[in-house]
Image (cartoon, grey):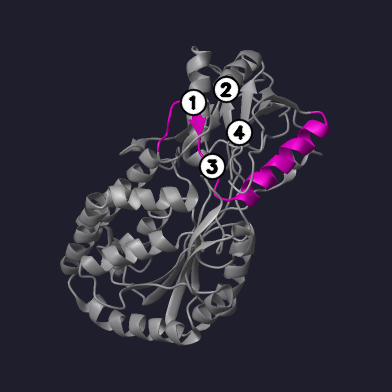
């Protein structure tokens, strides 16, 4: 483990503060022997863990939940430094993990209960939910605690054991989760953090003791992991990137509608799967809506994500993310898009990019067609940050009072397109709620 290294020469597991560009600390990648030990420990622990009554497993998980809230401030400081998350959002994320772990601890028996189904023969058939064994989790940097919680909580309660490979930019938060598991009394081998390399991931998935893999990451990473899982006949859950639009068909209060769109886009500096990367607005309110967004974007300055002073914005996760975003915005402007506000790349090696508002996006622009990298299996391919990628102008989209659509995407520069009126009614609506200060994922209805 080393500290204070030049960020331009560093790869692997490290804490790189995006507000300063400084590599604060480095960590060694696991050795092959440590990988073998982790696999053996997880496999041996599974036999005894799955035999415990669910209520006993749930008691451990309840204690994990308590520790997330007890240590929320400390956990928040860690991810603010690791990936630039604003402090209040970082605290909310840690506390939200308490809700997740408690939910599965409190409801595990009901969720896992046998479910009888009808049969053609008149006999009795039951769907059972049973633990399967060792699972590999490959988790991203954008929500270092939440992403792990929603994978680990149900599987620990059910009786599976977990090997967790976190993003290379989140080693301290990964170790903090391991410490919580240990301090909650979770038996050795039931949850194991492993600083594995990409090559070692392939070895782990191929191991016959591993029964499945769950990845949240980019489409590129998902294709690799899906191929490895298929080749080895392993169960796989892949949550990959998306770019669904945020559609405003009409609004009684355009200023409030724009403020909601702005707040949704700016959460986690836009680095969220359900951020509104593309905004499509009905033609009747388009100009006023853009003007309101532009006003919100003007005059902002880079700020300390730990202080969250008024009128400031946080850095992206890395300098590479900021530079990639800057290139896409410049390409759009060079090809005819209008930059209304923001769009300024800060001095390196920090990762600041001024939130931008773009209109006039066309298909030949990179901002329209480039798919940003979702949180990767290893964050060597940075996610796009503050500028949202706008969509092409839709030809037919109904405008109807009181209707809006909000769904997945990335970043903080906002691309706004016009929507013309036509007949018809939208059938999909995404409802978003907030839990403990953090916007939960949208649910399609």
Neighbourhood count class around disc 3 (C-alpha, 10 Å): few under 14, some 14–19, many 20 upward: many
Is 94 on the left-hand or right-hand side of 337?
Answer: left
Quarter occupied by the N terminus: bottom left
Residue 118 lies in quadrant: bottom left
Residue 110 in view: no
Q: Are marks 1 and 2 in contact (CB under 8 Å)?
A: yes
Q: Is residue 293 magenta?
A: no
- Residue 315 is marked as 3
Of residues 173 and 109, the one drawn nearer to the viewer in this rendering: 173
Of residues 429 and 95, the one drawn nearer to the viewer in this rendering: 95
Reply above or below: 165 against 433.
below
Query: In the rendered structure, which segment of residues is drawn in magenta?
Result: 307-336
Residue linked to disc 1: 311
- Residue 354 is marked as 4
Residue 371 coordinates in the image, percent (x, y): 67, 48
Reply above or below: 253 against 49.
above
Labels 1 and 2: the sequence-earlier one: 2
Residue 437 coordinates in the image, percent (x, y): 34, 37
Of residues 89 and 363, the one drawn nearer to the viewer in this rendering: 89
Quarter occupied by the C terminus: top left
Labels 1 and 4: the sequence-earlier one: 1
Label 4 vs label 3: CA separation? 9 Å
């Amino acid at each position: 483990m080393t500290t204070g290294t030049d960020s331009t020469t560093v790869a692997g597991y490290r804490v790189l503060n995006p507000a300063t560009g400084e590599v604060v600390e480095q960590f060694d990648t696991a050795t092959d022997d440590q990988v073998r030990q982790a696999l053996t420990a997880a496999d041996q622990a599974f036999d005894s863990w799955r035999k415990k009554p669910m209520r006993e497993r749930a008691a451990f998980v309840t204690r994990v939940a308590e520790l997330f809230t007890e240590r929320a401030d400390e956990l928040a400081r860690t991810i603010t430094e690791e990936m630039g998350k604003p402090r209040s959002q970082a605290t909310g994320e840690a506390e939200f993990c308490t809700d997740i772990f408690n939910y599965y601890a409190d409801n595990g028996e009901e969720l896992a209960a046998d479910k009888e189904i009808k049969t053609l023969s008149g006999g009795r058939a039951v769907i059972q939910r049973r633990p399967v064994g060792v699972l590999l989790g490959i988790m991203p940097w954008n929500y270092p605690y939440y992403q792990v919680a929603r994978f680990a909580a149900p599987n620990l309660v059910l009786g599976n054991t977990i090997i967790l490979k976190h993003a290379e930019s989140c080693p301290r938060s990964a170790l903090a989760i391991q410490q919580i598991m240990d301090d909650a009394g979770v038996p050795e081998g039931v949850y194991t953090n492993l600083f594995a390399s990409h090559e070692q991931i392939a070895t782990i998935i191929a191991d016959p003791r591993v029964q499945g893999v769950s990845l949240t990451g980019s489409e590129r990473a998902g294709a690799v992991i899906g191929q490895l899982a298929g080749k080895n006949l392993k169960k796989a859950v892949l949550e990959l990137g998306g770019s669904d639009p945020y559609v405003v068909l009409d609004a009684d209060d355009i200023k409030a509608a724009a403020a909601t769109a702005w707040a949704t886009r700016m959460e986690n500096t836009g680095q969220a799967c359900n951020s509104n990367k593309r905004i499509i607005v009905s033609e009747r309110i388009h100009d006023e809506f853009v003007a309101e967004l532009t006003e919100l974007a003007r005059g902002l300055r880079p700020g300390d994500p730990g202080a969250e002073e008024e009128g400031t914005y946080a850095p992206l996760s890395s300098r590479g993310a900021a530079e990639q975003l800057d290139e896409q915005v410049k390409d759009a402007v060079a090809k005819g898009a209008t930059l209304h506000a923001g769009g300024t790349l800060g001095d390196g090696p920090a990762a600041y990019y001024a939130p931008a508002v773009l209109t006039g996006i066309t298909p030949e622009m990179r901002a329209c067609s480039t798919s940003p990298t979702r949180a990767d299996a290893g964050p060597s391919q940075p996610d796009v940050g503050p500028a949202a990628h706008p969509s092409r102008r839709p030809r037919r989209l109904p405008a109807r009072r009181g209707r809006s659509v909000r769904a997945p995407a990335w970043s903080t520069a906002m691309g706004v397109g016009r929507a013309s009126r036509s007949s018809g009614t939208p059938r999909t609506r995404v409802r978003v709620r907030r839990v403990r200060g953090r916007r939960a994922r949208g649910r399609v209805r």
